Image (cartoon, coloured by chain):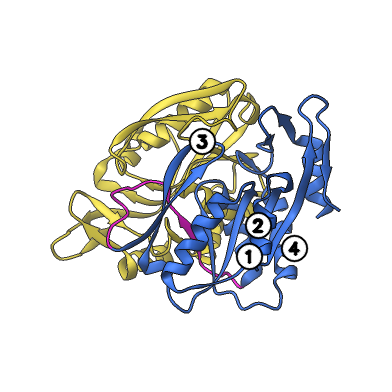
Chain colours: A blue, B yellow
Amino acid sequence: MKELEERIRLQGTVKPGNVLKVDAFLNHQCDVELFDHMGAAWAEHFAGKTINKILTIEASGIGIACVAARHFGNAPVVFAKKAQSINLDGDQYTTTVYSFTKQKEFPVIVSKRYLNEGDHVLLLDDFLANGKALKGLINLCHDAGATVEGIGIAVEKGFQGGGDELRAAGYDVDSLAIVESMDPETGTIEFRS
Amino acid sequence: MKELEERIRLQGTVKPGNVLKVDAFLNHQCDVELFDHMGAAWAEHFAGKTINKILTIEASGIGIACVAARHFGNAPVVFAKKAQSINLDGDQYTTTVYSFTKQKEFPVIVSKRYLNEGDHVLLLDDFLANGKALKGLINLCHDAGATVEGIGIAVEKGFQGGGDELRAAGYDVDSLAIVESMDPETGTIEFRS
């Protein structure tokens, strides 16, 4: 998606340790018009699929998923939680994943009420690096007996391999921008064509 | 807002300890069409105000704010973070608030790049109980020299007083449903008229 690549070139910054900061428009300040265009792009890619639910993970995926949902017939968005809270009770699907950005393990939790056998799920998230968070969401879908119809990602860091692993495992992964390489010294960002 | 009150009556559940669970449509599973109607209601209420930025707090506020933003000319949405991360660097506005639902203190952080003097800010959030999270966001706006033009809330627990304190302090608080009382024994929920 040219628009997203251009925004990354314009406003993204490359930091040491494979960090790509896109907080000007994606995951701290949110450009909701861009999110809407991202939703339209995913809807075009997944046009042949029956999707009745969108699953994402807090926090940065939520805004993207909620704006994109109108391109999927206002499908309900469920966001997995990363911590227990008194607002979470009853039966839950849970798994554990390691966060690259927070540098620690955290739980991923979805109430059994909101993920069911027979659900046809689109997974959406802002970033895909090593794919650990997504594999956690896939595990929750498997536990629930739900079908993962596809995975929509804003920015994939292709050189970290998570996206290609998921494709090799048979998932339809639509990343709107795939960073093939980036250089914190020069700030250069190369996209997969 | 009748639609929201009806959803709360239909799908909300009252738990001991002043907990109102609305995770079926507001803060775990998200009804994005309802969010859109909420955005339209806030846009009507705040029609006379100049608003160039929406500020919310992770996680449950993000989806609501991002969907509502299209009713405010696609104003950028900034979500305050509750934890440090390697994605947060540079100068930050920070404050500390106590969470009723998580039962602990946490930081509230916004990068100085995304909240500025001259910003006219609408604060949006899913819940208002004692108002501690909102007061944290207001502190960040004051630190930045930004103007708080108004506060839009989905569900206010009126009996916990935070909303009325903010109104007494001069803020224009538009809560779409104000719960005046609720009973975990009977499940009864009374709204302020």
Amino acid found under the numbered disc labelled 1 = Ala
Mark 3 or 2: in front is 2
Compare marks 4 and 3 and give the one earlier in the sequence: 4
Q: Horizontal placement of A60 versus B152: left or right?
A: right
* Of pointers 3 and 1, the one earlier in the residue sequence: 3
Provide the residue designation for mark 3: A102
- Whether callout 4 and callout 3 share a subunit is answered yes
Q: Pointer 4 indicates a residue of which chain?
A: A
What residue appears at the point 45 percent right and 74 percent down from the top-left corner? Answer: A145
Q: Disc 4 or disc 3, which is closer to the eye? A: 3
Q: CA distance from mark 3 to mark 2?
A: 22 Å
Q: State the predominant SS element of the stretch in magenta.
A: loop
Residue at the (35%, 34%) spot, across then down: B132
- Extreme residue toward the right, this view: A193
Magenta residues, start to end: A73-90
> Do marks 1 and 2 share a chain?
yes
- Please report, as a chain letter, where disc 3 is located: A
The kind of secondary structure element at disc 3 is loop
Q: What's the amino acid at mark 3?
A: Lys
Q: Amino acid at mark 2?
A: Glu
Residue A160 to residue B80: above or below: below
The circle on residue A165 is 2
Check contact, mark 1 vs mark 2: CB within 8 A: yes
Q: Which residue is mark 1?
A: A169
A145 is higher (above) or lower (below) than A133: below
Left or right of B11: which side holds A171?
right
Q: Which residue is mark 4?
A: A41
Looking at the picture, how far across and down is residue A83, in whole percent?
38, 46
Q: Quadrant of the C terminus of chain B?
A: bottom left
The image shows residue B119 at horizontal and vertical percentages of 63, 31
